Image: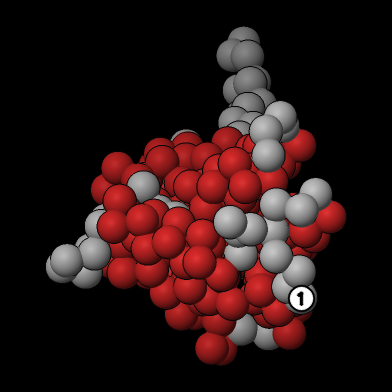
Amino acid sequence: MTEPPSPRRRTPAPPREDVLAAAMDMIAERGLEKLTMAALGREVGMSSGHLLYYFRSKDELLLQTLEWSEGRLGAERGRLLAGPGSARERLSAYVDLYVPEGHRDPHWTLWLEVWNRSQNADDEARLRQAAIESAWHRDLVALIAEGISRGEFRRVDADRFAARLRALLDGFSIHVAIGLRGTDREQVLAHVREFVEDALVVS
């Protein structure tokens, strides 16, 4: 008498964070153009259909990957801003964390792609993107306000100054991330340091 076939075991899906980490690794190693649902599925042992079940679309996968990456940056930013040192020193650390490491920096590559796709995003996705930007802005405003209270920074409107400084950082960072000729990370950091010294630091 033959035994009945054993029930087929389903391979458990990897935790969501593992999938997002794998997506980020693929962007870093192979570029965003190589990140397809099929390629990511092979990387984590899932079918592209299974991935779509969890993420609904590539746009959602990219946004969740960006949120995951931002969460890690946010934790690092929190440690820097809560650490020792003057407000001026911690502002320098904030800028250093903000500016891309170089051409094709994976986090900035992903950020640019998500924002490019956001032209057709729904309201919920736009709110989630705004939350990412708000976290950076809120921390910068608090740091500038602290520097003002300590007498390290001039008495500026912290919110307005933070908005202008982040616009400067965004513009320069895009140049670095896309590899614009004549603009590298060290040049950008020097420009930003000069602007902060001239416009904010009490001499």
Pick the front one: 198 or 141: 198
Q: Residue at coordinates 24% horizontally, 64% vertically from top-left?
A: 183
Query: Quarter-wise, where is residue 182 in the image?
Result: bottom left
Q: Is residue 52 left or right of residue 22?
A: right
The residue sitting at 76% across, 69% down in the picture is 155
Question: Circle 1 sits in a helix, a strand or a loop, which is it?
Answer: loop
- 42 left or right of 79 in image: left
Q: Is residue 3 above or below residue 57?
A: above
What's the residue type where badge 1 is placed? Answer: Asp
Q: Which colour scheme is used?
A: secondary structure
Q: Residues within 10 Å of mark 1 (few under 14, many from 20)?
A: few
Judge by depth and name the residue closer to the eye, 99 or 195.
195
Farthest residue, direction top? 1
Quarter of the figure with the N terminus: top right
Total marks shown come to: 1
Q: Where is residue 128 in the image (x, y as percent from the top left)?
A: 72, 69
Residue 63 location, quadrant: bottom right
Q: Residue furthest bottom?
A: 120
Task: Name the foreground residue: 145 vs 2.
Answer: 145
User: Circle 1 is placed at which residue position?
Assistant: 157
